[in-house]
Amino acid sequence: MSARALFLCLALAGAARAAETPASAPHSVEVNSIRNPEMRSYRSIWAGLDAFDEYRRMAPAAPLRFRVLGADGKPVATAEGLALRLASDEGSTPVAIDAAGLVDIARSRAAYDADAYFILNQKRGRFSARPEIRTPGLPDNVRRLGDLRLACRVSVAIAKDQIPFLARAAINTLMLSTDWCGKKDMNASFPAEGELESAVISHGGRSAELELESHRDAYMAPLGNPAWPDDALITLKYAAPAP
């Protein structure tokens, strides 16, 4: 199996979610005159929070936040004009998005029981989000492998909750495992914040260069390789900007 299988599976999961109709959302919720707005079930996010708690040992010092992405899959340059709220038939509560496009999500049993939805004031398909798990104190160009492993666990937990049972079963068959992140030969693609010259993983005096994606704006992290512990660091070296 290709080491990029996880990337494919998450893409399939995303496609399955995109194919869902908004009919499953609460009917009486006002959507600020936006037809077919971007929505996400709070219960799906709750599954991600559960995964974060279960695998917290991978990144014990890192908080969980969610980063808003544009249609191109890259972080938004500014959150100006974006408004997020958590809504159900019982009411609506605004959810803050900071200037960098980061969102903190807390547990709410009331929102879970009410089957609430996160609703963004933008049309469906224009924006998405991904877990942002970063251990404090690291340089901007350094990633900790345990942080990435935990982010994968959160993403997969949310994806599994969003897609039908048969779709999950098909992906399990493709993966030859129910553990989409921990498969021994599993590498996963993670975006960088610009064109990369190299990505090097290191720990305990040894190092190895990681594969870059074709556009050199993402790198392949060895999530399933037990030879690299959670404390291994990935140093991203960015290409010099063009004149």
Image: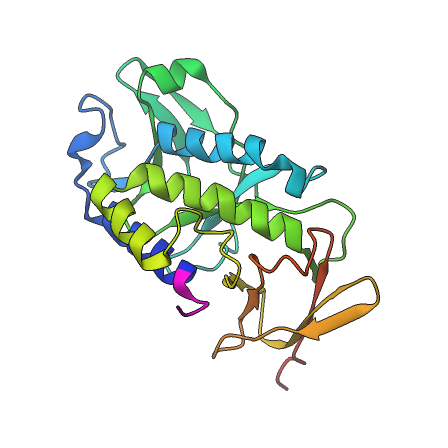
Compared to residue 181, the image places residue 158 above or below, namely: above
Position of 134 compared to 50: left or right? right
Q: Residue at x 45, y 45 (%)?
A: 155
Q: Nearer the viewer, residue 67 or 146?
A: 146
Q: Is residue 123 left or right of residue 229?
A: left
Residue 96 drawn at (x, y percent): 51, 32
Quadrant of the frame with the N terminus: bottom left
Q: Residue furthest bottom?
A: 243
Q: Which one is nearer the viewer's eye here, 112 or 6?
A: 6
Q: Is residue 123 magenta?
A: no
Residue 136, position as x, y percentages in the image: 74, 44
Quadrant of the snapshot with the C terminus: bottom right
Of 170 and 27, the residue lying toward us: 170
Q: Give the color scheme: rainbow, by chain, secondary structure or one colour.
A: rainbow
| Rendered position, 120 above or below 141 | above
Spot the residue most to the right: 205
User: Would residue 53 be seen by someone viewing this image from the given angle?
Assistant: yes
Residue 7 is left or right of residue 225, and the answer is left
Q: Which stretch is magenta? A: 1-5
Percent of width and height locating residue 32: 27, 32
Classified by dominant secondary structure, the portion drawn in magenta counts as loop
Q: Residue drawn at (50%, 31%), measured in percent from left and top?
A: 49
* Apparent side of residue 205 relative to residue 2 in the rendered image (left or right): right
Quadrant in the rendering for residue 83: top left
Image coords of residue 171 (percent x, y): 30, 53
The residue depicted at 25 percent of the width and 52 percent of the height is: 170
